[in-house]
Image (cartoon, grey):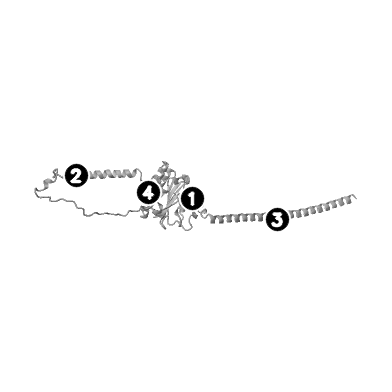
Amino acid sequence: MGAGYGDACAGRSTEMGVGYGDACAGRSTEMGVGVGDICAGRSAERKREKNAAAGLVFMIMFLVSAVLSVTCPGMFGAIGAAEVSAAGTVPEFDGWVQDDAGLLSAEEEDALEKECARVSEVHGMGVYIVTTPDFGGGDIKNWQRQIFTGYGLGADCADSGVMLAISMAARDWGLVGFGEAQGAFTTYGRERMGELILDDLSDGEFYDAFTRYVSMADDYLTAYEEGKPYTEDRHYGEGWRIPLIIGISFLLSLTVSLTIVLTWKKSMNTRVRRDGALEYMREGSFHLSNRTDRFLYHTVSRSKRQKESSSGSAGSGMRSDRSGTSGKF
């Protein structure tokens, strides 16, 4: 009996253990599969939501860009130098002088580079020269502004400076001031500089024109720092220098003239001082029988009064705005 009971109990235990274990295993397997399927479904749903949100954001950004490109076509022109001009040549600016048009020899470019660096360091404002075969058309001043911004020029000079640009395709030139330098390069100052370098540009003497530009830029910045910029009320090149030059020329001319006259005077030894001309007349050779005054005719000369030509940028072919001046050479 004892053995039978023990065997029976053992059999039940074994049977119950196996059955219970199988049941638990089945439930665990079933629950694990169900939970995994649920998690996988939720992950896929979240991924679809993220993709939809990203697509919506992209669509909004595309629409905003399209609207800005239509309403503000020049807004994106200054973002990068590669977008300066679709049809023009994009310069690779390095230093103060960029001669992409090949107008200067290596020695001339190096000399201008050093002089621009010196003037820029002295005044704390950049002095730049850029030449290009073709800037792409339009207004060269806008092209210069895009170059200045796109390359970050003036970064070491508080974003201040001046740039002279030459484009050979249509023989355009432009002069633009940036930042604080606009106070030194006024409209009068820029047009005056254009007048003084225009002849050299037209004759192909580009090095002489660029040298004069850098020299005048030095003068302009010095005058601005002294609180006396060149304007319509204070003209460049018409101060103390011109009277001094005229005075020196007069003294030299007077000295040469006096030397010549005194030399001639010493060689005139046959002259004898006379008080009158009667001694040269033969006595009795002249008899005045009658004296009368008779009016014959009069002559009137007339000349047409010339009209004064209007001064300003219109007469010289220059175009100026608040910070730049451009023209043809």
Q: Where is residue 84 shown, x and y percent of the image? A: 48, 54
The one of 306 and 225 positioned closer to us in this rendering: 306
Which residue is at the far left? 284
Q: CA distance from mark 3 to mark 1?
A: 52 Å
Q: Where is residue 188 shown, x and y percent of the image? A: 41, 48
Instruction: Tell which tag, 2 or 3, sits nearer the viewer.
Output: 2
Density class for disc 4 (Cα within 10 Å; few <14, some 14-19, many ≥20) is some
Q: Where is residue 118 shown, x and y percent of the image? A: 41, 44
- Element on which disc 1 rests: helix
Q: Amino acid at mark 3?
A: Gly
Q: CA distance from mark 1 to mark 4?
A: 26 Å
Instruction: Tell which tag, 4 or 2, sits nearer the viewer.
Output: 2
Instruction: Tell which tag, 4 or 3, sits nearer the viewer.
Output: 4
According to the picture, the residue beneath numbered tag 2 turns out to be 263
> In screen coordinates, is 53 left or right of 147?
right
The one of 20 and 27 positioned closer to us in this rendering: 27
Instruction: Tell which tag, 2 or 1, sits nearer the viewer.
Output: 2
Q: Amino acid at mark 2?
A: Thr
Residue 92 seen: no
Q: Residue at x 30, y 45 (%)?
A: 246
Q: CA distance from mark 4 to mark 3?
A: 77 Å
> In screen coordinates, is 271 left or right of 248?
left
- Whichever of callouts 3 and 1 sits on the residue coming sooner in the sequence is 3
Q: Residue at x 62, y 55 (%)?
A: 56
- Whichever of callouts 2 and 3 sits on the residue coming sooner in the sequence is 3
The one of 317 and 40 positioned closer to us in this rendering: 317
Give the numbered dot on residue 41.
3
- Whichever of callouts 2 and 1 sits on the residue coming sooner in the sequence is 1
> In screen coordinates, is 251 left or right of 44?
left
According to the picture, the residue beneath numbered tag 1 turns out to be 149
Q: Where is residue 284 shown, x and y percent of the image? A: 9, 49
The one of 100 and 324 positioned closer to us in this rendering: 324
